[in-house]
Image (spheres, grey):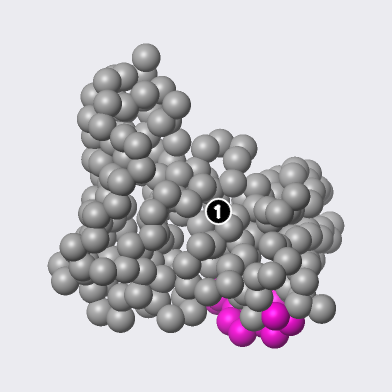
Amino acid sequence: ILNVEQSPQSLHVQEGDSTNFTCSFPSSNFYALHWYRWETAKSPEALFVMTLNGDEKKKGRISATLNTKEGYSYLYIKGSQPEDSATYLCALTNNNDMRFGAGTRLTVKP
Amino acid sequence: DTGVSQDPRHKITKRGQNVTFRCDPISEHNRLYWYRQTLGQGPEFLTYFQNEAQLEKSRLLSDRFSAERPKGSFSTLEIQRTEQGDSAMYLCASTLGRYGYTFGSGTRLTVV
């Protein structure tokens, strides 16, 4: 059974602060780790897909790292903006199975 | 429109009624997934199709739930004799492989 855990469950930061969240997963039978941003009333939007230990991906102010040996991924947001407010989901792909964490709900206050 | 579309966006139904949702995936995607998300939880896997074959079904999917993908294109998810615990967001996603899942906007079901 794939068990994907995210922390913290929710986070409130001020505009301009940098922040990060964690996704933990079992390191065995790893295939790929996905990060999604899910804004209210919209579809989850794919941010990154990472497959290799040590992968680092960046998209604007958002970046992610992957450690498959210890089973974690970090998502970083530099200089948070109110429009970054959303739920950030990570998901683990293993063969034909994809399991999501419960998400981290980020609120950025102006 | 080249995305995944779901219909309806919102559904309010009385307990005990049957409801059916539809998902139209990206046309060349052979895999289609249904997920359910309740408040405070991440999306939970319900079932998955490769073309028209239903290959996996979660234990979450009781016998009141049935899903079909008759021609390997659109899919329907039916819930019979709805219960208040069925209230959730039902998400559909499609993919060609293990990368690049595309989600629909979801159907929000409220059972009153």
Give me the residue at 41% from left, 23% from top: A82
Image spot of residue B74 (x, y percent): 78, 67
- The residue pinned by badge 1 equals B37
- Left or right position of B70 against A104: right
Q: Is residue B53 left or right of residue A21?
A: right
Q: Is residue B2 left or right of residue A103?
A: right
Above or below: residue A3 compared with residue B15: below
> At label 1, which amino acid type do we have?
Gln
Magenta segment's dominant SS is loop
Residue A35 visible to an observer of this rendering: yes
**Residue B109 can be seen, yes or no:** no
Quadrant of the rendering where the C terminus of chain A is positioned: top left
Please state the horizontal and vertical placement of residue B102, each as a whole percent of the image: 58, 58
B11 versus A66 height, above or below:
above
Stretch of the chain drawn in magenta: B51-63
Percent x, y of residue A30: 31, 75
Would you identify the image quadrant in which residue A20 lies? top left
Residue in front for this viewpoint, B23 or A49: A49
Residue occupying the far top of the picture:
A110
- Residues A84 and B60: in front is A84
Q: Is A2 colored magenta in this rendering?
A: no
A19 or A25, which lies in front? A19
Q: Residue placed at 69% from the left, 70% from the top?
A: B28
Residue at position x 36%, y 19% in the image: A109
